[in-house]
Image (tube, rainbow, N blue to C red):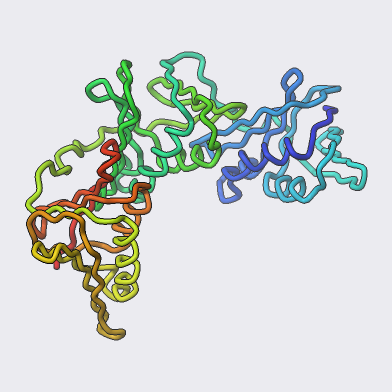
Amino acid sequence: MKLQVTQENLNRALSSVARIASSRGTLPILANVLIKTSKNRLSLSATNLEVAITHFIGAKVGDGGAITVPARLMQDFIGSLPEGVINLELEGTKLHITTDQYQSVVNGIIADDFPVMPTMNNGSSWKMSSGVLKKALQQVVFTASSDETRPALTGVLIRTSEGELVMAATDSYRLAEKRLGKENQNIELLIPATSLNDLLRIIGDSDEEVKVTHNEQQVLFQVGDIELVTRLLEGSYPDYQKLIPKDFTTTVRLKRADLISITKISGLFARESAGSITIDVDTEKKKLSIRSVASQLGENTATAQASKVTGGGSITLNSRFLLDALSAMTGDEIVFGFNGKLEPTLLQDPNDLDYRHVVMPLKS
């Protein structure tokens, strides 16, 4: 293998793929990145056996070939080099890397020992805007569970419902659902949340299309010159729709920034009680107040003015879950509704009804 590539392109590709290379796995080669020529392009690939990422970049290829090299070393080294042309030449299992100022040799492992990168030769395909997908992932993925004893909840459900594409995730304490627009195909995919976090890192801010191809075992996301393949989770997802309340005895409409501010302050006094805060709604004064008590530190009550209040009452929530939900929204105002102390609460942006966020109450 002998080729030339720019530092900028090589560094960008390594940043995309090296993150998932794992040095903690049972196979030492999984800590490596596969560097391989493909016609007049260079591909860099890494996998942890659950998800695989390949990034293609342009290169001036003299001789073809393939080698695997330590991902962390390559990422740190190439990232430290100045911009310009880098020469790569393979001799046996030694990769010679030279620039005008540097001459280095990285010891590799033959590519034959690297796991076979998954391919998608058949399956159903659909496309969507990368901007729409990125926002949906940011609003939904963080609510998936990390408890491996309930594997279905560690995934994110992407499915069609009544002609619309819907993304949802829950850890049984909170739930997020985002409607992504019209889709005629019958889609139902349960994708590991960890894989979608990797996808989120490689999606840019542009509106270029993301192509999604899937079969019964895996799903492929193609974003520009980057491909991500991940396995699908088995099992059925719970019928989360039953958790989403439709009518409320108490609703409050107020500025999102105000609710974030008083929740943060109240959360400081709620650390001893695992983030427990009590929300009180005053109908007559049109106010929402948050009360928190710390036996060692003291207590706090913070109040925000509401623009509209229906009904009154109180409910106890986890302050971190409430902040996470508010941070996932982008509008100026928020509508907060609940039914008694033990029923699920719902948060929505009144100008973006495609996103719904449910937080389960704590026993007060």
Q: Is residue 185 above or below residue 134?
A: above
* Residue drawn at x 32%, y 70% as measured from the top left: 267
Q: Is residue 70 left or right of residue 3?
A: left
Residue occupying image coordinates x 80% and y 22%: 64
| Residue 333 or residue 176, whichever sits in front | 333
Res 148 seen here: no
Q: Quadrant of the C terminus?
A: bottom left
Q: Quick check: can you spot residue 59?
A: yes
Q: Quadrant of residue 43?
A: top right
In the image, residue 92 sits, relative to residue 361, either above or below, namely: above
- Image quarter hosting the N terminus: top right
Picture layout, residue 12 above or below residue 361: above
Q: Position of residue 19 (x, y in %)?
A: 59, 45
Q: Where is residue 3, by image quadrant?
A: top right
- Residue 314 in the image: state x and y as whole percent: 12, 64
Q: Residue at x 31, y 84 (%)?
A: 297
Count all numbered tags in the image, as a single digit: 0
Percent position (x, y) of residue 106?
Answer: 81, 44
